[in-house]
Image (cartoon, helix red, strand yellow):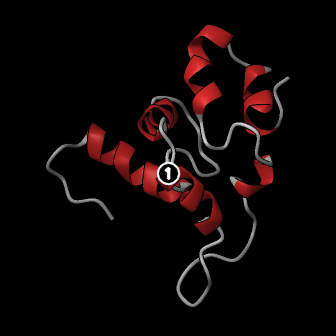
Amino acid sequence: MRTGVTEALFRFKEPADLAWMEDAACARMAVSIFFAAGPRGRGFDDPDAEAKAVCAGCSVQQECLSYALDRPETDGVWGGYGAGERDAMRRARRHPGRATR
């Protein structure tokens, strides 16, 4: 039985497309860890730190990041990177050689 993160995603996608998620370190963890709310920016603790720590030891981290970069995943931590970090990666993909902020 699927729970947590994979359950939420399997409701919207074909299981064959997401087979790698079964091996994800987050597969049975609470979704809220990866979509943490809280103040962001200088002077605040990173609300994504717990999720990023889980991702750091995940065997499918690269697949997860690629999945998020190839889709409009605009929230949460995917593949060890937060939304703003992935936005910068997408900009870099669209404009190679251009400096990103």
Vertical placement of residue 7 versus 99, above or below: above
* Residue 46 horizontal/vertical position (percent): 59, 74
Q: Image point 73% across, 72% down: which residue? A: 38
Q: How many marks?
A: 1
Vertical placement of residue 69 versus 57, above or below: above
Position of 9 with respect to 74 (left or right) is: right
Q: 15 or 41, which lies in front? A: 15
* Residue 15 horizontal/vertical position (percent): 67, 12
Q: 96 or 47, which lies in front? A: 47
Residue bearing the label numbered 1: 57
Q: Image point 73% across, 28% down: which residue? A: 9
Q: Image point 62% across, 82% down: which residue? A: 45
Q: Quadrant of residue 74?
A: top right
Position of 96 with respect to 47 (left or right) is: left
Work out which quarter of the rendered image holds the C terminus and state it: bottom left
Element on which disc 1 rests: loop
* Residue 5 horizontal/vertical position (percent): 74, 38
Other residues around mark 1 within 10 Å, as few (<14) / some (14–19) / many (≥20): few
Vertical placement of residue 47 versus 10, above or below: below
List the single residue furthest toward the left. Answer: 97
Label 1 is placed on what type of residue? Gly
* Residue 100 horizontal/vertical position (percent): 28, 59
Work out which quarter of the rendered image holds the N terminus and state it: top right
